[in-house]
Image (spheres, helix red, strand yellow):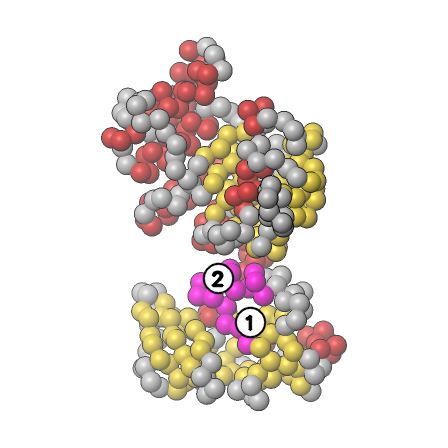
Amino acid sequence: MKVELKNIGKKYENRENFTLRGIDLTIEEKDFCVILGPSGCGKTTLLRMIAGLNSVTEGDLLFDGRRVNKVAAKDRDIAMVFQSYALYPHMTVYDNMAFSLSMRKERKKIINERVMEAAELLQITEYLHSKPSDISGGQRQRVALGRAIVRNPSVFLMDEPLSNLDAKLREHMRVELVRLHKKLGTTTIYVTHDQVEAMTMANRIVLMNDGKIQQTGAPDEFYEKPGNIFVAKFIGSPTMNMFDGCITDGNFVFDDGVVRIVPSEPLKKLLDPYEGKNVSVGIRAERFEKDSIHRNNIKCTIDVIEMLGKEKLLYCRLSNDKEIVISAPGYNRYEEGMEYTFGFDDSVVHYFNTETGERINK
């Protein structure tokens, strides 16, 4: 099912401002779309509006071109998976999965076929006669997914379904959900604040902040071409290194030359209108190279080295005490307290308008 949001807005009673406003978004059939953003940005409110659990204050919500603003949640052909699993503790796994079909008075034969098919798909057949309290958190999450699958919905809505799992199990379930989506091909809208989940699972990401969409696109677009400063800082771990400076004689200058970047000729033309004006630049931690031959480089002193196995995170300090983070291969040797020179290619530098936050080098 194709889901379209046209100028969608939400304003709660007794609140002066809109929680969401001006949301324009198209989620194509079979998409795995992740709505990403910090706590309080409006992502769950948006999901609940799509589900029919929250009303739409303004705009149009369309399912396959049909306006569904006033359509009840039960009539929207969607299935929702919650963060808390919401399983009935007194029912067996089988009965939990069959419950919605039983309420629809579906034939027992069809109920059994769908439950068994979903259980086999999710590898929980051996737990069908267990109670939720007798199985692990990961298995309970699979039961919640199975309960949604048996309904054969046109859209899956998932509200941070993995947040209650430990790190290793979350990693495993991410892979399982992607495999499940490939098998079923059902349009999936998934809400999370975890950028790792978004980057590894989605074919399309919608990043929100303060009730507005900041950027939409494929995961690699967010990392390689963040549309504004908020996106640049939010996506990526460690956070992108940012420098606020100005364009002087065609070059970027930070704090009287502590960092000076000479852009390529094509980029210089883009920066011409910013001569003498404030510009912010961002460089990802892994883009710095030790003792490189690049014309752009910085000198910094390493304060702390964090060993992560295949990589080291170097927490460094420039001559003006500005802190930056550099990611280096784990086999490279460094010493805390020593000064090093790191270079970078000008093509990896992200330029932003400091005033508006918008990206300059498209």
110 shown above or below 123: above
Q: Residue at x 45, y 49 (%)?
A: 197
What residue type is disc 2 on? Gly
> Residue visible at 45% across and 52% down?
194
Q: Residue at x 66, y 39 (%)?
A: 57
Residue 188 position (above or below residue 335): above
Mark 1: which amino acid? Answer: Gly
Helix, strand or loop status at disc 2 = loop
Residue 317 drawn in magenta:
no
| Quadrant into which the N terminus falls | top right
Q: Residue 293 at x, y = what percent?
A: 51, 83
Q: Can residue 91 be seen here?
A: yes
Q: Is residue 352 left or right of residue 141?
A: right
Badge 1 crowding class, 10 Å Cα cut-off, few under 14, some 14 to 19, many 20 or more, is many
Q: Nearer the viewer, residue 85 or 182?
A: 85
Task: Tell me where the magenta segment starts and ends, as one range.
Answer: 229-243
Residue 358 appears at what percent x and percent y?
Answer: 65, 65
The quadrant in which the C terminus is found is bottom right
| Residue on which the image places disc 2 | 236
Considering depth in this image, is 348 or 238 the residue closer to the camera? Answer: 238
- Quickly name the residue at label 1: 282
Using residue 139 as the reference point, say whether residue 179 is left or right of it: right
